[in-house]
Amino acid sequence: MTNKVFYLTLTFIHFFALSFAQSITKIGYSQIGKASYYPDNREGRITAGGYKYDMNKLSAAHKYFPFGSIVKVRNIDNGKTVFLKIIDRPYTNERIIDVTLKAAQKLDIIGLNDAEVEVTLMDTPETLRAKKAKEKKLQSNNTTTNFSKELFYPTGTYTLNGEKYNGEGYSVMFLANSNIEDTYNDAINIKKSYNFEDVLIQTGWSNGQKEFRLLIGDFTSEDEGEQLLQLIKKISDQAEIKKHFN
């Protein structure tokens, strides 16, 4: 085999190995094999995943899981478990995982050349992002409003701080109902989700009942707000132009 072919073959094998190393993403996938822990001379070095190695953190090197994944490692001999973040690749195919000193202490494998462990994939960076987004959404939906609703009871147009809005123009009403807390929560969520600069609450009367209106935008004329009105009409059957008043 010529040197050129030899190096091309090595390059192909290296590329294939790297590709396969990132290919296992099935949550719950588990392996049983040998584990060991890093030598002390790795402290402070940059790992294959781009992380700075710290022996006092709960992290590990694994052959096939994406960097940033969370795995559960169980010592088969004593049942001790630990959750670790994948930041590196092992230096040998003889072991399925290498762990930090702190992780080794928790697994009680200090002093052993190799230990028999079960490694289970619990999360990948993708599933972690999805969980974080879901949690953020739940927190947003379940936000307990800390505001004084009495500030919004007199008729008028208000900022979300409960201060009278001095603008004399127009806004597009997104919705209206008789519950100030619901209107306020909707206003907060819309401002966070869509980054509207002007989100207001207007207190008025309709058919003899007080209503609280969620307003979007601040326009000098009804014509100026027409484009936003047509957009909001696609998602709200209450959309209409409202004039500010105090």
Image (tube, helix red, strand yellow):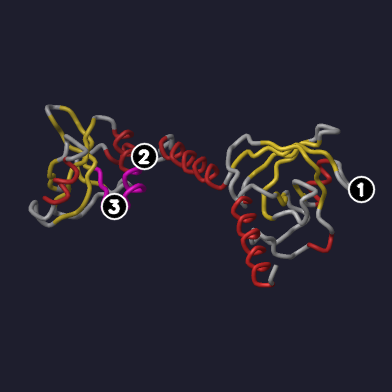
Q: Residue furthest right?
A: 111
Q: Nearer the viewer, residue 158 or 83?
A: 83
Q: Nearer the viewer, residue 166 or 198?
A: 198
Q: Residue furthest bottom?
A: 3
The answer to which quarter of the image holds residue 52 is bottom right
> Which residue bears the numbered disc 2?
148
Q: Separation of disc 2 and disc 1 at Cα?
A: 62 Å
Mark 1, Cα crowd under 10 Å, few <14 / some 14-19 / many 20+, is few
Q: Is residue 201 above or below residue 197?
A: above
In the picture, measured across the screen, residue 28 lies left or right of residue 102, that is left
Q: Is residue 205 magenta?
A: no
- First in sequence, mark 2 or 3: give its number: 2
Q: Is residue 11 above or below residue 167?
A: below
Q: Which residues are magenta?
A: 188-201
Amino acid of disc 3: Phe
In the picture, measured across the screen, residue 219 lies left or right of residue 199, that is left
Residue 77 x, y percent position in the rendering? 85, 33
Provide the secondary structure element on which disc 2 rests. Answer: loop
Residue at 66 percent of width and 68 percent of height = 7
> Which residue bears the numbered disc 1?
111
Residue at 41 percent of width and 36 percent of height = 141
Amino acid of disc 1: Gly
Residue 164 x, y percent position in the rendering? 25, 49
- First in sequence, mark 2 or 1: give its number: 1
Q: Nearer the viewer, residue 29 or 6?
A: 6
Provide the secondary structure element on which disc 3 rests. Answer: loop
Q: Is residue 195 magenta?
A: yes
Using the image, tell me which numbered label, if any, was put on residue 196. 3
Q: Residue furthest front?
A: 1
Provide the secondary structure element on which disc 1 rests. Answer: loop
